[in-house]
Amino acid sequence: MKTPPDLFWSSQPPPKALSRSEVEAAIREHFPEPELAEQLLGLIRPGVHLWPGPAIEPTPTSLRLGGLPYAPAGWTWPRYEEEPLLFIGQFDCAAFARHAAGALLPPDGTLAFFGGPDITYETIFSDRPEQAVVVHWPAGTPLHLADAPEPDVGVLPLSGVQAFDVYELPRYGEAVLADFMRTHAMAHRYFKLLDQVSVRISTDGPHVHLCKTTKLLGWRDNVRVRNDQPAQCRLLLQAGPYDNGEAERNWIDSACSYFTIEASALAEHRFDRVGLNTQVTMRPDERSKLPPPRARSRTSIEQEVVAKYPDDFGRQLAAQIRPAMLLWPRPAPADPMASRLGGKPLAPEGWEWPTYDEEPMLFIAQINCAELKGEAAALLPRDGLLCFFGDPDVSAGCGPGGDSGLGAVFHWPAGTELVPHDPPEDDVEILLSAGMEFLETFTLPDLFSGITGGRADDRNFRMGYPDTHGIALPADGREPDLSDPTQLLGWHHLVQSEMYICEDPTWRLLLQVGTYDDGQKNHWWGPGGTIYFMIREEDLATYRFDNVVFDAQCT
């Protein structure tokens, strides 16, 4: 499901979450086994969602995000290494007395949250208790609107919030879910349960889940694939993106910041023992440090599809399975003939660098066909190098794609004498060089492709649609981040809706490249983008790579 990038939460009324009894009923529906149901019932946690609204005139008892805090006279603004902490929000505890989660908080007084800018703005993951300050001022303490400690201190957009109850189950990545992540089938059941009990809103655009929102207590919405914190560590406040109808606040790289506290400290209201942790979407410079995921067989995918859809659609979908090669990133190879992303291309002497509208293209990748194996490899030349080039404006998300002149693919047969080539102009970017490991897999059409027709509008269909990458869920539950895979052949994976060129079913994917890394640095395409080289089936069959279409999609 794709969240509209321009959705302002404050323009929507607060959604109605499921009651505890409704969550319990959903658990028993999805897990009728008594032992499993009891285990999940014990994991329910109450929380309070803080729904953003317009800017308000702040008072000592208002519930709000951003702006400036109310504090006692003579109070000193908290700092870290002489830098003022960022004021996140302030909440009157008495307002939470009617909420189930309110029993875990002080019955009255004001809670104010401050965090270090270097952890709320930057890509830092470890707990930093020295950068987290949570202050509780008891009821009756005279509070006054504080001034900013320095003229240039960051002040977040002011947003009044409305509170509503939620009853949550742990998100994937929590260690307590180990028993439910041991098999693909069990994990799928849990994810369907999680979807049913998760808070969501309906807008004029796509169906939208509420994740990465701002809330007190409950379970954290893990942005990354796992939560590395100790089991006794509880969420106190999750600070996600928000808006006030005029301005919005987004943390870096689709991140959330979490104020966490040990259960014992929460019970004693010891807010001087709070930590601060930030998660962003999986840093690509971590992907190459992990082993590639396990692929599923064609047979297992066929069986799942036919069992899930025992009608003509199931048989038609099973017939659409396509072999592919997942390209898992690795450090840059020493062998210049090895398959890799980025760097400088190999080409014959006298070869001319491809251009579009007199601008040199970017060298994207080279594939040594002799390294390929499996069903997908049979669709490509048996040897030689495939070299891919694309328009820099399209790859940056700054220009429209979908034309044949925007990309170029060359095949140098084995035995061709090749030499490295420098870009023809000094300002042409040389992309980060990274190696790749090939993984044979089988793919299904993207949920939002034309193959599924209008079925993707149905919530139950979306939730039950099989994994499109042909990847098995690892036994430890650490699902690999495949939101923007790099892949040869198979079905293309969409960032947005179906590409117009695919209205003609003879066009298919040759190569798509997502975010990649070399173990130290990473390379992104546009804002959250993926680039695609598309080719007609008849041209692929005859190795006619001179008519490819280059395109890109971004968030």
Image: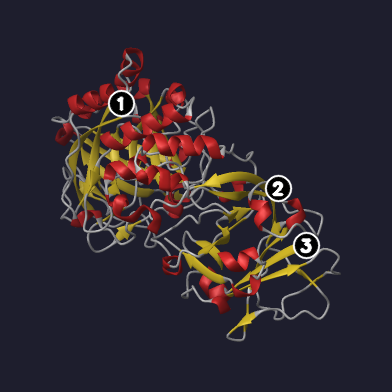
Which residue, given by chain and number where applicable, does mark 1 sit on? 30
Q: Position of residue 389 (x, y in %)?
A: 64, 70
Crowding at mark 2 (Cα within 10 Å: few <14, some 14-19, many 20+) = some
Of circles 3 and 1, the one toward us is 3
Looking at the image, residue 321 sits to the left or right of residue 251; the answer is: right
Badge 2 or badge 1: first in the primary sequence: 1
Looking at the image, residue 550 sits to the left or right of residue 465; the answer is: right
Q: Position of residue 480 (x, y in %)?
A: 53, 40
Q: Secondary structure at mark 1?
A: helix
Crowding at mark 1 (Cα within 10 Å: few <14, some 14-19, many 20+) = some
What is the CA distance from the residue labelled 2 to the residue labelled 1? 40 Å
Looking at the rendered structure, the kind of residue marked 3 is: Gly
Q: Position of residue 348 (x, y in %)?
A: 81, 74
Residue at 18% x, 38% y: name it.
164
- In depth, the one of 224 and 416 nearer the eye is 416
Residue at 36% x, 45% y: name it.
312
Which residue, given by chain and number where applicable, does mark 3 sit on? 384
Q: Quadrant of the C terminus?
A: bottom left
Looking at the image, residue 259 sits to the left or right of residue 354; the answer is: left
Which residue, given by chain and number where applicable, does mark 2 sit on? 373
Looking at the image, residue 293 sits to the left or right of residue 33; the answer is: right
Observer able to see residue 228: yes
What is the CA distance from the residue labelled 2 to the residue labelled 3? 14 Å
Residue extending farthest bottom: 358
Crowding at mark 3 (Cα within 10 Å: few <14, some 14-19, many 20+) = some
Q: Position of residue 412 (x, y in %)?
A: 77, 68
What is the CA distance from the residue labelled 3 to the residue labelled 1? 52 Å
Badge 3 or badge 1: first in the primary sequence: 1
Compared to 91, does 327 lie above or below?
below
Badge 2 or badge 3: first in the primary sequence: 2
